[in-house]
């Protein structure tokens, strides 16, 4: 399984619009330092996880040519508001019809909220027929090709935020990119090969509403994966702490994601 990080940034991508800090200036000059908002892609099954506002740029940068399946972790704009651009990429405006219909895998509770926050979704799915909604449930496995996908709600069946466990043969990867502060249950994650997890906040002295980096390290110790890759790296944190902070925090089995990183599993 080839699991590709399309976007490793946070709610605000790097470079941040209008910002002239050292980090953003560098990212405009060198694409290596650019971080789009969080999303990922599995090549074998043409599957995208999350769809932020800058998804078109992420797909174009990585040369992705087809999406058949889209998994949604939660409704937030930096994970869903690229839906129009993604879905309309499959629309033939001359023939006035859809060329491909993407299956959107989403929890019912998340879908209800997303419809309220992003009502254009109804037009895209019900009128243009560009997508079909497939409801997912906590711990109910989905099989695509030879890859098994298990949604994991952070608060069980009534969750508003989900992670996904991907299994192929005897290998296991969990993708948990955002809003993991109140996630307490890790019982399904025994013998995990790769944990792709949101980067805890370095500025936990200022911000209490997000998972702190020390708490993240405690969580990793409990789950005990063979390797952890941190994503959802916020521009404001890079701005405050600098790129050297990531090098300082890197450990033997812990590293930071970057746009285009391919995880072979």
Image (cartoon, rainbow, N blue to C red):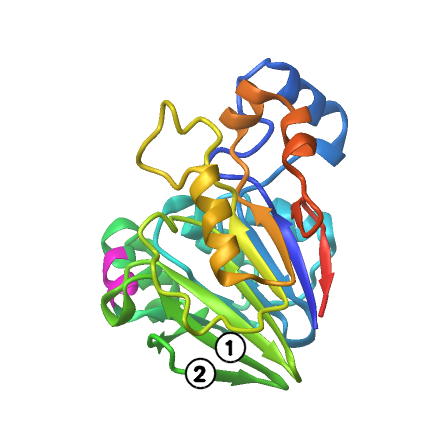
Q: Residue 141 in magenta?
A: no
Q: How many numbered callouts?
A: 2
Give above or below for 67 relative to 148. above
State the image coordinates of residue 168 (x, y, percent, origin top left): 64, 80
State the image coordinates of residue 162 (x, y, percent, origin top left): 38, 62
Mark 2: which secondary structure? Answer: loop
Rounded to the nearest whole Å, what is the CA distance between mark 1 and mark 2? 6 Å
Q: Which mark is residue 149?
A: 1
Give, as a single range, the part of the protein colored magenta. 109-113
Q: In the shown orientation, is residue 206 left or right of residue 230? A: left
Residue identified by numbered label 2 = 141
One can see residue 92 in this view: no
User: Which sits in the foreground, 118 or 205?
Assistant: 205
Give above or below for 82 relative to 173. above
* Mark closer to the chain start, 1 or 2: 2
* Rendering quarter of residue 210: top left
Give above or below for 215 relative to 176. above
User: Which sits in the foreground, 116 or 220?
Assistant: 220
* Rendering quarter of residue 238: top right
Name the quadrant of the C terminus: bottom right
């Amino acid at each position: 399984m080839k699991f590709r990080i399309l976007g490793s940034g946070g709610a605000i991508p790097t470079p941040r619009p209008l910002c002239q800090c050292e980090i953003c200036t560098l990212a405009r000059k060198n694409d290596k330092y650019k971080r789009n908002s969080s999303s990922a892609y599995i090549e074998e099954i043409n599957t995208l996880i999350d769809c932020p506002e800058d998804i078109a740029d992420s797909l174009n940068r990585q040369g992705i040519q087809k999406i058949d399946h889209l998994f949604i972790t939660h409704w937030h704009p930096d994970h869903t508001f690229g839906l129009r651009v993604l879905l309309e990429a499959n629309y033939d405006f001359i023939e006035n019809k859809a060329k491909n219909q993407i299956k959107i895998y989403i929890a019912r509770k998340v879908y209800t909220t997303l419809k309220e926050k992003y009502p254009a979704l109804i037009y895209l799915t019900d009128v243009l027929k560009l997508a079909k909604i497939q409801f997912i449930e906590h711990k109910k496995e989905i099989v695509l090709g030879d890859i098994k996908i298990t949604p994991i709600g952070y608060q069980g069946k009534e969750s508003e935020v989900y992670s996904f466990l991907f299994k192929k043969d005897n290998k296991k990867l969990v993708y948990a990119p955002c809003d993991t502060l109140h996630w307490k249950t890790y019982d399904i994650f025994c013998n995990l090969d790769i944990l792709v997890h949101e980067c805890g906040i370095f500025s936990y002295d200022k911000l209490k509403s997000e998972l702190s980096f020390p708490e993240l390290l405690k969580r990793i110790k409990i789950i005990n994966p063979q390797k952890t890759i941190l994503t959802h790296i916020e521009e404001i944190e890079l701005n405050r702490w600098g790129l050297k902070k990531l090098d300082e925090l890197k450990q033997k089995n812990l590293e930071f994601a970057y746009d285009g990183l391919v995880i072979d599993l």
